Amino acid sequence: MKRYAIIALLALAACKQQGGAAEPAKGGPPPLLPYQMRAEVPSGDRLAAGRDGKALFENHCGACHLIGGMGTNLLTKQRVMAGETPDKGLLANRTDLTADYVKQVVRMGKNAMPAQTRVDLTDAELDSVAAYLGKAN
Amino acid sequence: MKLTLPPRVSPQGFDSALQAFAGVVGKDWVMSSDADRDAYSDVYAPGPAEQWPASAAVAPATVEEVQAIVRLANEHKTPLWPVARGKNLGYGTSAPRMAGSVVLDMGRMNKILELDSKLAYCVVEPGVGFFDLFEHMQREKAPLWMSVPGNAWGSVIGNALEHGIGYTPYGLHARNLCGIEAVLPDGDLLRTGMGAMKDNPAWHVFPMGYGPTWDLAFSQSNLGVVTKAGVWLQPAPPASLELIFDIPEADDIGWVIDTITPLKISGLIEQNVFIPSWLGKMVLKGQRKDFWDKPSAIPEWRVQELLKEHKLGYWQVALRLYGDESVIKAKAEIVKAAMARNLKAPPVENWWHEGDAISAFDITMGIPSAVPLQMSDWIGGRGAHMGFSPVVPATGEHVLGQMHRSRKIIDSFDVDFYASFTINGRFANNVNMLMFDRDQPEQIATMKKLFNALIDETAKAGYGEYRTHLGWMDAVMDTFDFNDHALRRFNQKIKDALDPNGIIAPGKQGVWPAAYRDKAAEGQA
């Protein structure tokens, strides 16, 4: 229970650091966690280069890798155990990822994450996402 | 993954089939590299994923493209394995039953065609995931809820067609399907029910048709490729109350079932009531090694310690009532009085009202989540799971018999016992979750032997599974043995009549077309 409580707190901390959707709007219902209400899929030809990597990441990868998602929960635990701050559970906050590494994990899968097909994310979309996440390049 | 050609197709014949497919969908949507084949393999396979290899994948964007591909597949004798979004995790993911089949990935067909808030239904294509539909309903401010499975990453239609189960009043997902459009094995296009009449507005509201009703003939089926379907949705309730009962002993499940089933059948309880054993709660609290650091099953004395330390009962009933607050209050009194006949401790009560937050871990309130999949971290490494899922009548007698039988078998293999029962009305689904590390061959070998023993012993007692992994599709079909396997013979007669080339999903659920019946012995776990 303790461990679970810690993970929940870490996720909340990550959320606040992100300026995420943790604060309820006045008078209305509380906003959903980001992974439950992703941005709409960016328009445009899925095979064309140069689309918005952030928007593509948030739509195609967000169900697991935005705040509150399964991937974020597991990675937060991993990063904290590795001595890093909980906000590094969010891939968007990582500074140690290279574009090539991102591409490899997406296509090959890693631990609980299955490999993604080219229907899940086209090569052109993956290039954009890898450029967005690959801050160590 | 190296290329495995479809049976009796030459490398040249295969290339010309792929070129023909590319002529329909464009070369970028025909995927046939080693990496593509890896991505379409069963990542959770009990054993090497090479047992169920796809040769390639093709992804159409329209109904017309599906029809064209099916016609070309007949011409080139290249069988297709349709998947909606390919996230049937634990049952084969997107991998085909027959080696060398071409995956027909419907993921690009992801349009929400209609959302009717008044009559509470939607019409969607197979590529629409639970997250997509949920977000669309939020943007439209539709006062509707979906019923979601534990892993909501997958397809709304795909999950319903595979007989997926959720935990709301709309939890029997196949029953939510109303009006299907399917491409038949010869490329023809059929609309079921009232949709058989051009532009009939009752297509997605009347659940039968004129004459035989075919909607569910396309579920767990290889008779066609579903290209759209109506899905009924739940009107969003103004309030909800969760009653959490911790049930102390394993054998208490008998009286729990006998208490809840009549309330469910009468309609007082509307949802499918999910009753997991204690391990279902523990898997989200950390990793197995934190609680028991030996490979052997967690012994009973340690189970009792853990229950005490974590203040858990052996089972937990988290029952939810939906509707107007006054109605819920009246229903809750009846439920509490019924449970109090056997349980002194009152339930924990959690009220929810429209506008309140919903926990990400709660799958009884229509919000999609993949968070329950975190249980894959319990074992560590490349964690995977399989579910042994027989169906029994929802009485204490049947449920206790089933639990004792499967527990004895699982104990004899020195594996942790992690069961759940879901009361759906007159029947209960029993899922025995078997978790393993994909990189530990001895664990996989044990799981396979255990799974075979569970199928055999459960069938001897007279019960069958509702769904299974690729590697056991034939073994489970074998257990449906009335009148010399009349069901399989009937399915195969229909299959051969509609699909003489056996082009759609050969071997799906143990139904083999004549063209590939000699392949049934391969790919069995």
Image: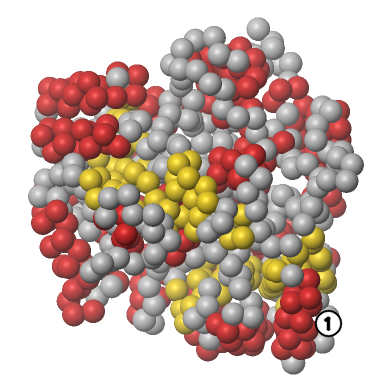
Q: In this view, which residue lies farthest toward the right?
A: A26
Quadrant (top left/top right/bottom left/bottom right) for the N terminus of chain B: top left
Q: Left or right: where does residue A131 sit relative to residue B188?
A: right
Comparing B475 with B442, the one in front is B475
User: Residue B389's x, y, as percent?
Assistant: 46, 66
* Residue B351 occupies quadrant: bottom right
Report if residue B408 is visible in the image. no
Residue occupying image coordinates x 49% and y 85% = B398
User: Residue B291's x, y, as percent?
Assistant: 74, 57
Q: Name the residue beneath numbered marker 1.
A: B345
User: Residue B286's x, y, as percent?
Assistant: 73, 50
Neighbor class of circle 1 (other Cα within 10 Å; few <14, some 14-19, many 20+) is few
Residue occupying image coordinates x 78% and y 41% = A31
Residue occupying image coordinates x 21% and y 33% = B68
Q: Left or right: where does residue B271 sit relative to residue B328?
A: left
Q: Disc 1 marks which amino acid?
A: Ala
User: Residue A41's x, y, as percent?
Assistant: 56, 27
Comparing B451 with A34, the one in front is A34
Residue occupying image coordinates x 57% and y 53% = B117
Q: Is residue B207 placed above or below B37 in the rendered structure? A: below
Q: Left or right: where does residue B274 sit relative to residue B124?
A: right
Q: Give the structural element (helix, strand or loop) at label 1.
A: loop
Q: In this view, which residue lies farthest toward the top?
A: A137
